[in-house]
Amino acid sequence: MERRDRIAKICTDLGVNARIGQKMSHFTSLKVGGEIDAIAYPETRQQAAQLVHALNEAGIRWSPLGYGTNLLVKDGEIQRVAVSLRTLEELLVFDETRVHVHAGYSLPRLVNAAADRGLAGIQGLAPIPGSVGGAIKMNAGSHGYEIADVIETVAVARAGEVVTLKRAEIAFAYRWSPFTETDLILGTTLQLKHGDVAALKEEIKQYKQHRSATQPVRDSSAGCIFKNPGQGLTTGRIIDELGLKGKAEGGATISTLHANFIVTNGAATASEVFTLIDEIRSRVATERGIDLELEVEVWE
Ligand code: EPU
């Protein structure tokens, strides 16, 4: 059986909705990427766990797909299944200072919902446009806040089952978690603390204003392309100092607002984005002796 037929059968057998043959440029904020085998939409955590287990058993590659806001997908055929958790049934449950949320939930919506209830601890994450699962996978952070700081447990799919891990079992680091390609993050419980509703809302407003003033929020991008290199250095400043702002390759341009962003014009290809990435990397390596590491996730 053809790979796509096998995928369709696995999804049908488990009762999982799937769309076969989808252009990833429609599912990523960078708006590039070729055609993927399928996007699957499980409706429960158990169904999601069974789905990725069945795909593993069949030797079919899969990846979690959130809002596609930190994702660079190559052009051409993408041989894998994107597993979206945006349609998981259970959404958001507050329990005193705890919040239980599934991985497909929007991070900014979660932060706003917590602030509405006077719950603090994640307000710095408000401007990050992604899913909760994506934020956990890369230990998203901004303005001194990191999601790892408030995590109590994370539910993941392992061998067809839903397994709950405690924070102490998960060794998070800067923009990094130990979750691998074969772990599907399903949801989390966060431990927040009491705060003042008006003060939280004001703090969120400030972060959003700062982001709009310093990052190209109205353009198509995948956020910061590279991680900061450590030792207090900022990749955006380094690329800026090399005079690379505004450099274009086809429909892709190094942002004139923040040099660690590549923005696209809707007609760009992934290959043009990769060309800019290679150019930045080699200039930064040659002229600053720094080996930049990608911050975006790449699907090849
Ligand atoms: N800067 C420049 N030129 C530029 C960009 C920045 O000189 O083109 C300077 C700024 O003036 C500032 C310094 O570099 O003095 C730091 O810039 P910024 O405050 O924008 O922070 P960043 O380190 O570039 C990090 C995160 C962002 C997050 C912001 C805000 C990383 C790789 N990036 O950016 O996260 O939004 O802090 O807290 O850690 C992302 O994860 O996709 C992302 C954009």
Image: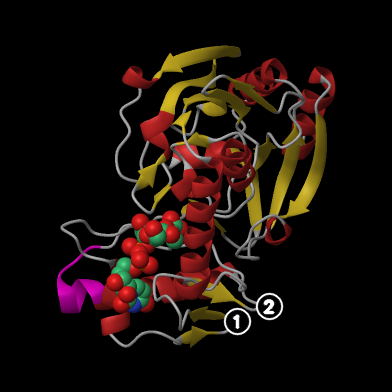
Residue in front for this viewpoint, 187 or 18: 187
The quarter of the rendered structure image containing the N terminus is top right
On screen, residue 145 versus residue 158, left or right, reads left
Q: What amino acid is labelled 2 in the image?
A: Ala
Residue at numbered disc 2: 267
User: Do residues under tags 1 and 2 come within 8 Å of each other at their CB atoms?
Assistant: yes
In magenta, the rendered stretch is: 284-291
Q: Is residue 23 visible?
A: yes
On screen, residue 16 versus residue 56, left or right, reads right
Residue 49 coordinates in the image, percent (x, y): 63, 19
Magenta segment main secondary structure? helix
Where's ligand 1: which quadrant?
A: bottom left
**Tag 2's secondary structure?**
loop
Identify the disc placed on residue 251.
Answer: 1
Q: What amino acid is labelled 1 in the image?
A: Gly
Q: Is mark 2 within 8 Å of ligand 1?
A: no
Residue 166 coordinates in the image, percent (x, y): 40, 16
Q: Residue at x 26, y 78 (%)?
A: 283
Question: Label 1: how many residues lie within 10 Å, few (<14), some (14-19) or many (20+)?
Answer: some
Q: Is residue 88 above or below residue 208?
A: above
Mark-to-mark CA distance, 1 and 2: 6 Å
Q: Colour mode? A: secondary structure
Q: Is residue 281 visible?
A: no
